[in-house]
């Protein structure tokens, strides 16, 4: 997989510009994802997991991970909603082969193979 080239100057950027979407369409899409984040925040408060904060990770207009604040539940001051969502997506979505494909050293994957962490990363 080849990395997408980023335009270096304004003229390159202008040549690659796509037509703007309708503002109403963008707002509708954003509100849909914001509602999901708010639902996560309410869920976190109801479960007493942490403060009223929710987060979603969106890729290609689909929610790929969502979570709420879990500072109290995990007794972890870093378990903010966005961090928890990222951790959820990375642990269960990442494969060692994918990391190697984007340039991570394969000796790290070899060291993890057979460990609990590697097995966890292989879950679908």
Image (spheres, rainbow, N blue to C red):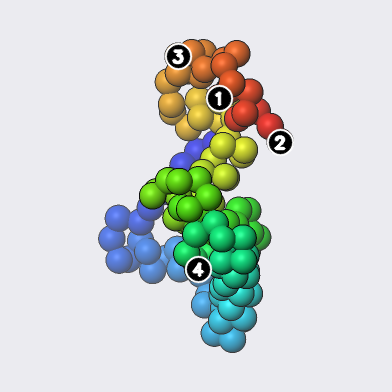
Alpha carbons under labels 1 and 2: distance apart: 14 Å
Residue at image location 55% in from the left, 24% down from the top: 117
Measured as percent of width and height from the top left, residue 22 is found at 58, 83
Q: Which mark is residue 107?
A: 3
Disc 4 is placed on an element classified as loop
Residue under label 1 = 117
| Residue under numbered circle 2 | 124
Query: How many angstroms separate mark 3 from mark 2 (CA)?
Result: 23 Å
Can the viewer see residue 56? no
Q: Taking the image as drawn, is residue 67 in sight?
A: yes
> Which residue was labeled with disc 4?
52
Give whichever of discs 3 and 2 has the lower sequence position: 3
Q: Residue furthest right?
A: 124
Q: Of callouts 4 and 3, which one flags the residue occurring earlier in the amino acid sequence? A: 4
Number of the front mark, 1 or 4? 4
Query: Alpha carbon of mark 2 to alpha carbon of mark 4: how far?
Result: 29 Å
Q: CA distance from mark 3 to mark 1?
A: 15 Å
Q: Residue at x 45, y 14 (%)?
A: 107
- Cα–Cα gap, marks 4 and 3: 41 Å
Q: Nearer the viewer, mark 3 or mark 2?
A: 2
């Amino acid at each position: 997989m080849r990395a997408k080239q980023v335009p270096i100057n304004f003229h390159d950027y202008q040549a690659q510009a796509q037509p703007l979407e309708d503002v109403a369409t963008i707002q509708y899409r954003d509100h849909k994802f914001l509602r999901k984040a708010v639902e996560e925040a309410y869920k976190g408060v109801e479960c007493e997991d942490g403060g009223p904060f929710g987060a979603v990770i969106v890729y290609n207009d689909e929610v790929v991970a969502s979570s709420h604040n879990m500072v109290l539940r995990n007794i972890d001051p870093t378990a903010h909603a966005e961090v928890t969502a990222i951790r959820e997506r990375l642990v269960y979505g990442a494969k060692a082969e994918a990391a190697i494909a984007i340039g991570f050293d394969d000796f790290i994957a070899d060291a993890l193979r057979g460990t609990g962490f590697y097995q966890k990363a292989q879950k679908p």
